[in-house]
Amino acid sequence: MVKKALTLTVIANITSNYGEGLGNVSSIQKVFRNGNTYATRSRESLKNSLMVQSGMYDDLKVTVDGATQKEVNEELNVSNCRALEGGYMNTSVGEKKLTYVRKSSFYLTDAVACEPFINEARFHNNLHLARTYGKANNIKLQDRDAAKKTGLMPYNYEYDKSLKIYSITFDLSMIGRDENFDVESNKKEKAGRVNSMLETIENFNLIVKGNLDNAEPIFIVGGLSDRMTHQFENVVRIKDGKLKITNDLKSKIDRGYKVGLLEGDGIDNETEILQELKPISVSNFFDNLKDEVNQYYGV
């Protein structure tokens, strides 16, 4: 079968994003599985960060027609606008207000923590700002009633940074194509779009609550595939800090996929991984993968 997909499963040490808060308390997003609670970073958060950091959103244009929508028309479509590669729905195209829908060319899973969540609360305040305002306006913070005028505000939030697993799969046959207008990008542009996102995954960073988060892959497995699915989603598992090296994982890898490892004791059984899976460095993994993408598109 022709390989028309690119699938990756990544283990990275990343923070969670936040759901709805209550008052001045912020709670991270979580899922409940097998009797335990796990911290997550949502696929929407990952996708938005990937599009922004890769430069794919640099040419984003929006319109407002009841709701904010990505601008789409015969002159501005997936073939010449990278921001539309992640999919769109526009309900007011042209004078007839036609609705056009185009699915994303790539799909992500949530990044779910490998171990159950243990609450780590962080407590903060804006004391220095309030003290500065109080000094300028002759207000003493020791006077409780007067201190309210300075805007002194304590707050706290849950914090989580832990090993999380997520998968991403590209439909290489859809990159740069917009069937709504029967147009597509040239081969060089298609390869450039995929490789820009691969470079971003390799050097991924996330910012939440003022924390700059190095989200680069510690472990990665995948490559070009003949199936449009997350090939390794069900076989990459961490338990007690160790990667579970199963026969099913090794069997899937043997079908023409590669493994990358960032050596630095990010995973407890690094020695076993090196012996059993024969990984290459993460940088070499991405260099090889970008070459395969170029070969696929013939550039």
Image: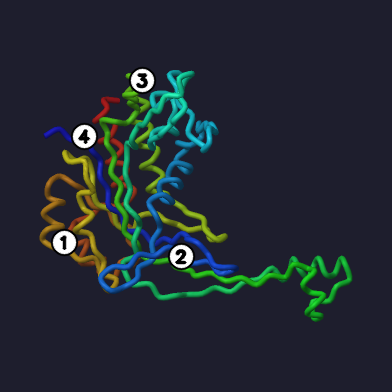
Disc 1 is placed on an element classified as helix
Q: Nearer the viewer, mark 1 or mark 2?
A: 2
Q: Quadrant of the N terminus?
A: top left
- Residue, far right: 138
Spatial CA span between label 4 and label 2: 36 Å
Residue 122 in the image: x percent, y percent?
A: 54, 73
User: Residue at 81% of width from left, 80% of height from top?
Assistant: 143
Amino acid bearing label 2: Ile
| Front residue (pair 118, 259) | 118
Between 238 and 152, the one nearer to me in the picture? 152
The dot on residue 4 is 4
Residue behind mark 1: 276
Q: Which residue is denoted by mark 3 in the rendering?
A: 181
Residue type indicated by callout 1: Glu
- Give the SS element for disc 3: loop
Residue drawn at (27%, 48%), measured in percent from left and top? 8
Distance between the Cα atoms at labels 3 and 2? 41 Å
